Image: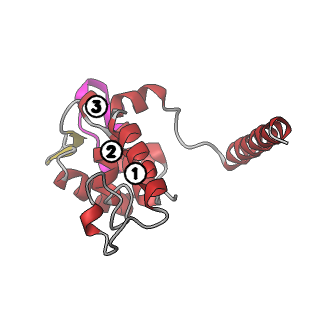
Amino acid sequence: MKISTRTEYGLRVLVTLARAENDRCLSLTEIAKREKMPHAYLEQLVGDLRRADLVTATRGKSGGYRLARPAAEIPMAEAVRALEGPLLEMPCAGANDLEHCDRPQPCSVHEVFQRVYESLSLSLGSTSLAEVVASAGGPPYPIAVRRRRVAEHSAMTSQHSTQQQARNP
């Protein structure tokens, strides 16, 4: 599964707005500078966030963007859907969407994708923007740090796989 840059940037905008002191407005220029993101791209994203009633805009010298409601009241599933669309784009992926399948019976992979959909929906639906803000790090890590983290993760995954194989010969 791939999370698009659009969704990543949009979520970073929401985190930045949630961190704003005294619920003040932030300009797109300020957000772009803090998060090291292209200003023009952010203009597109905040339009979708506004249409989804996740952010509001204020015009004028001290204007800008702010969250439309408290971060604790914004589930991540709502934010991802506003930016990306459906959580899992399959004709029959939703809990009650078997009627959208054109097959007389669920296909051979329906069950696994149903579990993926339910897991994503539950995980993102039960995580608020406030929880993400509380656990989020700072601005984007330099490339050297990201490469080190990927290497550490790969080593950990490899070690876990080796342990699993040793247990299940």
Amino acid at circle 3: Ala
Mark 2, residue position: 77
Residue 10 is situated, as x and y percent measured from the top left of the image, at 37, 51
Residue 141 relative to residue 117: left or right: right
Residue 131 is situated, as x and y percent measured from the top left of the image, at 39, 28
Write the start and end of the magenta stretch as one range. Answer: 16-28
Mark 1, residue position: 117
Crowd rating for badge 3 (residues with CA inside 10 Å; few <14, some 14–19, many 20+): many
- The circle drawn on residue 71 is 3
Residue 100 relative to residue 51: left or right: right
Amino acid at circle 1: Tyr
Residue 45 is situated, as x and y percent measured from the top left of the image, at 31, 58
Q: Majority secondary structure of the magenta segment?
A: helix
Vertical relation: 72 (above or below) 37:
above
Crowd rating for badge 1 (residues with CA inside 10 Å; few <14, some 14–19, many 20+): many
Vertical relation: 162 (above or below) 49:
above
Tag in front: 3 or 2: 2
Q: Earlier in the sequence, mark 3 or mark 2?
A: 3
Q: Which residue is painted at 18% across and 39% down in the image? A: 68
Residue 137 relative to residue 85: left or right: right
Amino acid at circle 2: Ala
Residues under labels 1 and 2: Cα distance? 11 Å
Residue 98 is situated, as x and y percent measured from the top left of the image, at 29, 62
Tag in front: 1 or 3: 1
Q: Secondary structure at mark 2?
A: helix
Q: Earlier in the sequence, mark 1 or mark 3?
A: 3
- The circle drawn on residue 1 is none
Q: Earlier in the sequence, mark 1 or mark 2?
A: 2
Q: Secondary structure at mark 1?
A: helix
Q: Which residue is painted at 52% across and 58% down in the image? A: 1
